Image (spheres, coloured by chain):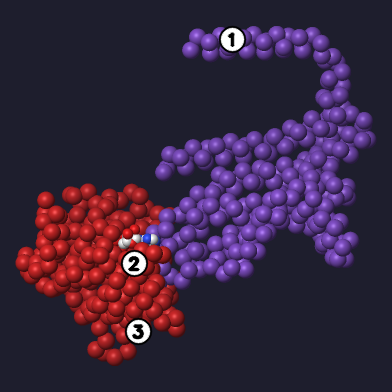
Amino acid sequence: MRRAEIRRRVIYVATIILLVVLAFTIDWQQLQQSFFQPDIIKAMFPDVILIGAKNTIIYTTLAFSFGLVLALFLALMKRSTIGPYRWFATGYIELFRGLPALITIILVAFGLPLALGIRIPGGTLGKGTLGLGLVAGAYMAETIRAGIEAVPRGQMEAARSLGMPKSTAMTYIILPQAFRIIIPPLTNELVLLIKDTSLLFVIGTTPLSKELTKFARDFMTSTQNATPLTVVAFMYLLITLPMTFLVQRLERKAGKGR
Amino acid sequence: MTVSAPPIEIEDLHKSFGELEVLRGVDLSVTTGEVICIIGPSGSGKSTLLRCVNLLEVPSAGRVLIEGYDITDPETDVDEVRAKIGMVFQQFNLFPHLTVLKNLTIAQRKVLGRATDEAISVAEAMLSRVGLADKRDEYPIRLSGGQQQRVAIARSLCMNPDMMLFDEPTSALDPELIDEVLDVMRALADEGMTMLIVTHEMRFAKQVADRVLFIDEGVIQEQGPPSDVLENPKNERTRRFLRAVEH
Ligand SMILES: Nc1ncnc2c1ncn2[C@@H]1O[C@H](COP(=O)(O)OP(=O)(O)O)[C@@H](O)[C@H]1O
Ligand SMILES: [Mg+2]
């Protein structure tokens, strides 16, 4: 008890000393010049929102929708009584969760056209959505499966004993309850996906299809300054922080309800 | 289907879970309108027997005929048969994401193909029958256990079942809520519903049952009218069981 108290005070004092030392050693002028140049900030608007943020949100929305549908099928396949369905789902999920997302994106954007001569339609939007969605689908499949399994067994039994075929019971009884359970983890996946859209800078984008990260990089190159990074960092936080708070609220509410 | 086919006919039914043989040869023929109470110690296979009747468990051997149709035959449309058999569970198993009314209409619409209006009027009639017409817009969580179980019974009745299975319908209820559920079941029995009831309510069984089955170790050890099985049991196991539950 006493020792813990002493340790805590030492940490507080050390932190304050560190901050004071930093305040004197840091070249504030230099810092402001590199990260907070008002001219550059001004120059980035309104395009950082009208192009960067807009595209980030579009890529996220499309990849999430595609990933969610894919995940639903994978989750149902993984629970199937038919062996090959289960094997495929398991193989898919493990493969795409095991690979770095960047590899999948490069594979879709450059690998497939090179190897098979397949051109993914829709430009950056098509390639980006497909690559990110394939990965998101693998992660969300496990989330959905966990949700389905969290619905008590008696629900399926009651539905079946009313004469509902399995698919009807799934659609109207099990899945609505499962999705309610997994709204918090799914929102988390969405936040991760928003951040992962930054990986799309590797596929090269036309001026109008840049998402936030690519937008910032190009601005950094032309200005030789790090300020654009600060601006898009704020943009990301502006999108992700409210969602993270929402998840926390939902989780608290779910915790109370049960 | 012949007119004389009994609602439920079970022939030499066996059910194993892995090594564990739970049912070891059950024969049972239920006549139309008959009310059968099934008693027996915990773990003796009562639930398993009931669940084999609507194929929630697949029998390991033997046959189950519902109105003459062999439901263990892979050709039989199980969903169609199940819609004719109402089932009431110990844990109610209402759908928590749906209101009481939707709990009662969903299967009518998706299974029987009834129009929404018709499904609603049937549901309202059944809710009145179990005395819960005023709860139609509530969610199940807001109801007491007794009310939930009555809604579950009404939900089954909406499908116009030819027979009903009850698996310990009052075992999860506080004592003061038991009678409201038993009253609904008693009314059903009076109206001529064919019923198979697993229960520990001996007084109810005495009043309502046409026949009582005592099951132990996966076989029917003794059966007959309640006055025989419950009041003058011949089997030593039955006597021991009844002594145990009375104290
Ligand atoms: N799905 C199952 N898997 C394995 N064992 C089971 C399963 N269902 C029931 N059993 C076992 O079968 C036996 C009989 O169970 P049950 O029919 O529920 O008995 P009762 O309803 O008479 O109490 C018990 O030993 C139980 O553990
Ligand atoms: Mg039981």
CA separation in Å, label 3 and label 1: 80 Å
Q: Looking at this view, name the residue that lies furthest to the front.
A: B19
Label 2: which secondary element: strand
Residue at the disc numbered 3: B69
Q: Where is residue A221 in the image (x, y as percent from the top left)?
A: 92, 35
Residue A50 is labelled as: none
Residue B126 is left or right of residue A86, and the answer is left
Label 1: which secondary element: helix
Task: Please report whichever mark, 3 or 2, sits nearer to the chain's N-terminal start.
Answer: 2
State ligand 1's quadrant. Answer: bottom left
The chain letter for the residue carrying disc 3 is: B
Residue B28 is left or right of residue A68, and the answer is left
Judging by colour alone, the chain drawn in purple in this rendered image is A
Quarter-of-image position of residue B31: bottom left
Q: Where is residue B129 in the image (x, y as percent from the top left)?
A: 23, 65
Residue at the disc numbered 1: A9
In the depicted structure, whether residue B64 falls above or below residue B166: below
Q: Callout 1, which amino acid?
A: Arg
CA separation in Å, label 2 and label 1: 66 Å
Q: How crowded is mark 2: few (under 14 residues within 10 Å), some or many (20 or more)?
A: some
In the depicted structure, whether residue B234 falls above or below residue A14: below
The chain letter for the residue carrying disc 1 is: A
Q: Looking at this view, name the residue that lies furthest to the bottom.
A: B2
Residue at the disc numbered 2: B21
The answer to whether residue B34 of the structure is visible from this angle is: yes
CA separation in Å, label 3 and label 2: 26 Å
Q: Callout 2, which amino acid?
A: Glu
Labels 3, 2: front one: 2
Q: Where is residue B189 in the image (x, y as percent from the top left)?
A: 18, 71
Label 2 CB-ligand 1 distance < 8 A: no
Q: Chain B is drawn in which colour?
A: red
